[in-house]
Image: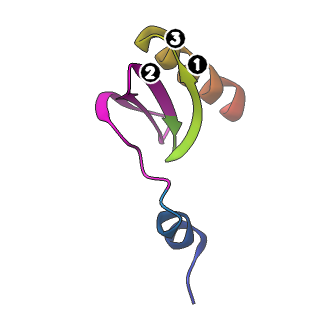
Amino acid sequence: MKDFSQLRELTGRKPKGRKVYDKKIKGISVMVHKDQNRFVTYVDGDRLDVYRSQREAEKAGLEFIKQYKG
């Protein structure tokens, strides 16, 4: 029987582009990848959103972690 993490990997939601930021906060990973002049934020392997600048993407990821873990 497959668990949820294996199914998520099979759906192809892997980050594309070049990794420009990677940090673990409270056990949750925050990654920012540059893809076609946009910055995509991934929180714990799930895509959060697309931003115009790297700084906006990092800030949004960290804010999400603060709200999520609260």
Q: Residues within 10 Å of mark 1 (few under 14, many from 20)?
A: some
Name of the residue lying farthest toward the front: 36
Residue located beneath label 3 in the image: 56
Quadrant that contains the N terminus: bottom right
Q: Residues within 10 Å of mark 3 (few under 14, many from 20)?
A: few
Left or right: 32, with 2 as reference point: left
Please determine whether, in this image, residue 41 is positioned above or below residue 55: below
Disc 1 element: helix
Q: Which mark is residue 60?
A: 1
Residue 2 image position (x, y, % from top left):
55, 83
Disc 2 element: strand
Left or right: 49, with 68 as reference point: left
Q: Which residue occupies the foreground of this view, 28 or 2?
A: 2
Dot 1 and dot 3 residues touching (CB under 8 Å): yes
Whole-number angstrom distance, CA of label 1 to CA of label 3: 6 Å
Q: Residues within 10 Å of mark 2 (few under 14, many from 20)?
A: some
Judging from the image, the colouring scheme is rainbow
Residue 17 image position (x, y, % from top left):
33, 36
Q: Residue at x 47, y 64 (%)?
A: 9
Residue located beneath label 2 in the image: 38
Q: Is residue 37 magenta?
A: yes
Dot 2 and dot 1 residues touching (CB under 8 Å): no
Left or right: 14, with 47 as reference point: left
Q: Residue at x 47, y 18 (%)?
A: 58
Q: Which residue occupies the foreground of this view, 6 or 24?
A: 6
Q: Of the residues shown, which amino acid type is indicated by label 1?
A: Ala
Query: Magenta span covers which residues?
Result: 13-41
Mark 2 or 1, closer to the camera: 2
Whole-number angstrom distance, CA of label 2 to CA of label 1: 14 Å
Q: Which mark is residue 41?
A: none
Quadrant that contains the C terminus: top right
Mark 2 or 3, closer to the camera: 2
